[in-house]
Amino acid sequence: MIHYDLRCTAGHDFDGWFKDSAAYEKQAKAGFVECPVCGSTEVSKQLMAPAIPKKGRSRAKETPPPVPATPPAPPPGDAPAAAGPMPAQVLALLQRMRSEVEKNCDYVGKDFAEEARKMHRGESDRRGIYGEASDTDAASLQEEGIEVARLPWVPRADG
């Protein structure tokens, strides 16, 4: 994993973890790297100091574990009181995203990790899928080079 300090054109700084520099370039070019504050996809890497391990210690011990770009949604009722309601524009955007996913992808439920592996190995036709996966399954898929993303799942706009 490689860690980058990133900045959007509005000046918001944030961290990003990627499989390698090529993965960053591919995701940034496709518009998948976006500022968590304003949503801008115009993002650039910032100057960083290299992570050099201390003598006698391995680099693996010093590199923090990767943090998913989108944390899993908390169970209902666990949101902090200060969080307040979701802004209407954000809710509308997430509802449109859900609609597009449901329209263009196949729901595979709890078989998500298994189906993603089948497609990766060529045992199943490649297509868009969505479903449920544990944090452990999602991390395993990423370690195997299978791209996955967690999406906040909001109620449908029509219901």
Image (cartoon, rainbow, N blue to C red):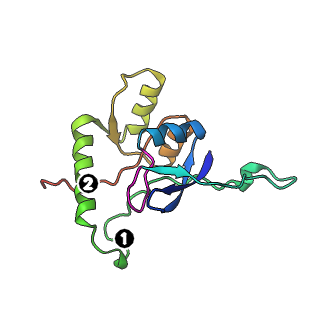
Disc 1: CA contacts within 10 A as few (<14), some (14-19) or many (>=20): few
Q: Say what amino acid the circle numbered 2 marks.
A: Leu
Picture residue at 33% right of the left edge, 40% below the top: 130
Residue extending farthest right: 56
Give the CA distance from mark 1 to mark 2. 22 Å
The stretch of residues the image draws in magenta is 32-41
Tag 1's secondary structure? loop
Residue toward you, 118 or 49:
49
Measured as percent of width and height from the top left, residue 97 is found at 27, 48
Picture residue at 46% right of the left edge, 31% below the top: 117
Residue placed under numbered mark 2 in the picture: 93
- Give the side of residue 16 with respect to residue 113, left or right: right
Residue extending farthest left: 158
Measured as percent of width and height from the top left, residue 52 is found at 77, 52
Picture residue at 38% right of the left edge, 75% below the top: 80
Q: Quadrant of residue 20?
A: top right
Label the magenta part by its dominant secondary structure.
loop
Label 1 vs label 2, nearer the camera: 2
Residue extending farthest bottom: 82
Residue placed under numbered mark 1 in the picture: 78
Disc 2: CA contacts within 10 A as few (<14), some (14-19) or many (>=20): few
Q: Quadrant of the C terminus?
A: bottom left
50 in magenta: no
Measured as percent of width and height from the top left, residue 138 is found at 48, 44
Q: Earlier in the sequence, mark 1 or mark 2?
A: 1
Residue toward you, 18 or 133:
18
